[in-house]
Amino acid sequence: MSGAIGGAMGGRARIEARFAKLRDEGRAALVTYVMSGDPDLATSARILAGLPAAGADIIELGLAFTDPMADGPSIQVAGLRALKAGITLKKTLAMAAEFRARDTETPIILMGYYNPIHSFGVEAFLAAASASGIDGLIMVDLPPEEDDELCRPALDAGLSFIRLATPTTDDARLGAVLANTSGFVYYVSYTGITGAGSADADTVGGAVARIRRHTDLPIAVGFGIRTPEQARAIAAVADGAVVGTAFTDAVRDSLDDGGNATMDTVDAVLNLTRELAAGVAAGRKRAAS
C-alpha cells in the first residue's frame, strides 16, 4: 500500500503479519466489531483509538446501512444511532485514517453491505479505503457469484476480501467461498442474524476442523460470543473469536435517557474488550496445555 497513512505494510500484509505474530505468541485473536459513528463520531473515534491497548487484535469497523439484513436488533439500532449522528462512508474512512496515523499495526476490516460502496463508486472507494489504511472488507451481501463486483477489484487493490462460511456451507459450496478469500475465514457459528444465539464450542470445533482441510487461512469464529467464558471456549478451537453484539450492547447500556454518550461510554467498551481479551488468551493456553 502506498501513501503516508497506509504505511509500508498494509492490506493483506498487515493481516498476515498480525496472525503470524499471534501464532508466535501461541494465542488466538480477539476480533472486535464496533459500529462506526456510534453513538456519535467523536465518541466512536475515541473507542476506536482505545481498542488496541485494551486487547483488540483486529478491528472490524461497521459501516452503517439502512437495511442491515444479516444483523440483529442491537447492531441495527447501533447503525441507526450512527446514521442519526451523521456518519457516512466518507466519514468512516476519515475515522480509519485518523486511527491509522497513530497505529500502523492493528488491522482494520470494514464490514457492511455493498450498496453504500456501489453508490460511492467501486474504483473511488478502493482508492480511498487503501489511502485510509483499511486492510480488508467483509461484505455480507456479495456471494462468490458476484466476485467481479468488488471482491476481485479489492484483491487487485491489495485489500483482503474475507468470506463468511456458515453451518449450511457444505464441502461443495466451501470451494467457491474460499476461492478468492484472503486474510482469514469468518465462520458464523449458527444460522440466523447476529445476537440471536450462542456459539457452541464443540460444534464449532468440528466445523473449524472441516474448514481447515480446505484452507491454510486462519479461521475466526463469530456470532454468539458475548462473554469472556464464551471467548475462551472458542479461542481453544479457532484462530480468533469475533465479538460484535456485546459491544453495541455496551454502548447502548452506557447512554443517557436521551440516547447520548456519557462519561462511561468509552470505558464500557474498553473494559469489555479487556475482559474478552483475557478470555481469549486463557482459551489458547488451555488448548496448548
Image (cartoon, rainbow, N blue to C red):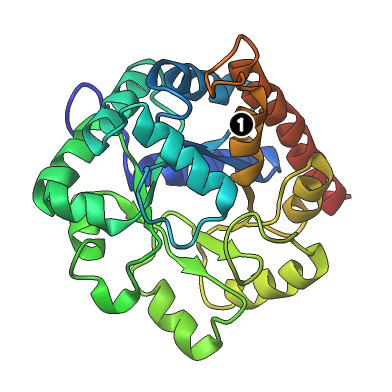
Residue 275 placed where, x, y %?
76, 30
Answer with left or right where residue 190 lies relative to residue 70: right
SS category of the residue bearing label 1: helix
Res 107 visible: no
The image quarter containing residue 175 is: bottom left
Q: Compare residues 189 and 154 and report the one nearer the observer.
A: 189
Circle 1: residue type:
Arg
Q: Position of residue 133 (x, y in %)?
A: 29, 32
- Residue at 79% across, 39% down: 279
Residue 62 as seen in the image, left or right of residue 282: left
User: Going 67% across and 37% down the picture, which residue do you hit?
Assistant: 25
Q: Quadrant of residue 220?
A: bottom right
Nearest the eye: 273 or 211: 273
How many C-alpha atoms fall within 10 Å of the one at disc 1: few (<14), some, or many (≥20)? many
Q: Where is 88 relative to 205, above or below? A: above
Q: Quadrant of the N terminus?
A: top left
Counting labels gives 1
Name the residue furthest front. Answer: 258
Q: Residue furthest bottom?
A: 172
Q: Is residue 168 visible?
A: yes
Q: Is residue 23 above or below residue 248?
A: below
For residue 289, side relative to residue 77 (left or right): right
Q: Tell me the residue at 34%/42% (across/down).
A: 135
Q: What residue is shown with label 1?
A: 252
User: Residue 4 location in percent, x, y?
Assistant: 20, 21
User: Residue 5: x percent and y percent?
Assistant: 25, 23
Tell me the residue at 70%/43% (across/down).
27
Q: Residue 264 occupies which quadrant of the picture?
A: top right
